[in-house]
Amino acid sequence: MLQTQKPVILELNTRVWLQSLNRDDHSPLTLAQVPDAALDRIAGVGANFLWLMGVWTRSPKGREQALALLPKFRGALPDIVAANVIASPYAVFDWQVAPELGGREALADLRRRLRQRGIGLILDYVSNHVARDHPWLYRQPDWFIQGSERDLQERPGDFFASQTRAGRRIFAHGRDPWFPGWTDTAQVNAFNPDYRQAVRQVLFDLAAQCDGLRCDMAMLLCNEVFATTWRDHIDPFDSPPEEIWQELIAALREQFPDILLIAEVYWDMEAELLRLGFDYCYDKPLYDALLHCDAGRLRAMLSTLVAHQDRLLRFTENHDERRAVTAFGEARSRAAFTLAATLPGAFLLHGGQLEGRATHLPVQLARRPVEASLPDHEDYQRRVLRELGAAPFRLGQWQLFEVLPPLDGHDRPDQLFAYGWACPGDWRLVIVNLGASPAWGRVPLAAWPEIATGSWRLEDCLDDACYDRDGARMTREGLEVLLPARGAHLFRFRPA
């Protein structure tokens, strides 16, 4: 049985991962040839799911466009050669496992071996667009948003011309309404009923090959967003009565009731996508609050209903964001990691994050640079992940605690955050200082009356330090803590 309560999801760039496993051989590995030792390392991290980013067949036209960007890629890979450049995994040419990865059979073999280790497989579904040379454009042009010659002349970055069986057509590139089009893609028409029926069959086929789907830019297909983005190129009366995700997810659940569905979503639309049937949504607001040290916003988010927080995917790094040690700085990235990993909801771990890699790799590259790891940084994060396997995190109840000034102090320690996980006879207490200076505070644990009798040894899972404290005082007056800048405690309670 796969763990779906507070799971850890490891994202790996498939091509980069396979290349890193086979650096000394010019013949790339297929998915079926991944060594068992590599899968054991994934299990050793504590991952419950592996998200393999980029297994579908990529676009030949997309690679041509990516090759033109080779000089820009040198910043990430100084010794880059043309063979290192591939098309974006988000410009899908065909919804089939790429032949060079071993095809469908190789993926099935890898999934079987992951399952033997209790790990589920998550794959991408790119919902908003396909590659600009996807066969659908030629065969089914009406499944796409189309423009005019004037659109092409005035907005060449958002439109392109292509031959179809119905003649020459002008198509829109896929786009986010706030940014220019993705020029290696073509925008689907989410309001077209024939397209909806076709994509349902695609989703059924993808779901048969994995345990979960991460749906790229899922909010772009919501009726209101889609209608607003393409209001000049669709008839508003064509808007279907039902949201596409509601329709697709309901059908998908009938055939695959246990499929895990994750929405990449922004613009504070998490609640809407959860309402439409997703299991988890990206928690970009948490990332932004951590990145910008917005303690007030973070405290407000942690005060929301736990039932909502349970369905958020927390992260401090992914393939779209800068590397955490670069974006936050090494010390602050550890504090942010502690919070993101131990809050309610799922946690996304990005490949290379543990080792402290600093290079943000474009998704059009199949090789990463060699980087020195940060052993202390890795040890710290592994300690956090190791503790997530304990019963309080997997089975217990989460509780946000108030942080008060110390008994002989006056200033409220606004940068201190405290919360805990509890199940019968087992407790974990997390306290993090997000501030740039030491913080002293007091955490009343009255919500845990069971600890009021007797004395307790608080074992810090992060550095093996131990502190003996009186249970009655902790519940009545609070546990006093003094944390250095960006410091954290992850306490395990043991009878003293």
Image: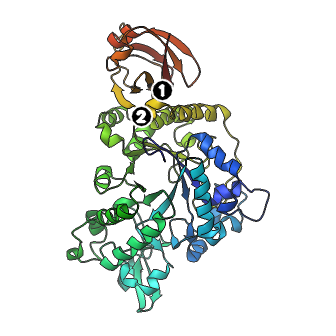
Residue placed under numbered mark 2 in the picture? 395
What amino acid is labelled 2 in the image?
Leu
Q: Residue at x 70, y 68 (%)?
A: 82
Q: Nearer the viewer, residue 236 or 467?
A: 467
What amino acid is labelled 1 in the image?
Ala
Determine whether, in the image, residue 333 is placed left or right of residue 269: right
**Residue 181 can be seen, yes or no:** no
Q: Position of residue 420 (x, y in %)?
A: 40, 26
Residue 362 vs 324, above or below: the answer is: below
Q: Position of residue 330 (x, y in %)?
A: 57, 35
Q: Nearer the viewer, residue 219 or 290?
A: 219
Determine whether, in the image, residue 333 is placed left or right of residue 417: right
Q: Position of residue 320 (x, y in %)?
A: 50, 54
Q: Nearer the viewer, residue 296 or 283?
A: 283
The quadrant holding residue 96 is bottom right
Crowding at dot 1, Cα within 10 Å, few <14 / some 14-19 / many 20+, comes out as: few
Residue 149 vs 53, above or below: the answer is: below
Residue 436 numbered tag: 1
The reply to whether dot 2 and dot 1 touch (C-beta < 8 Å) is: no
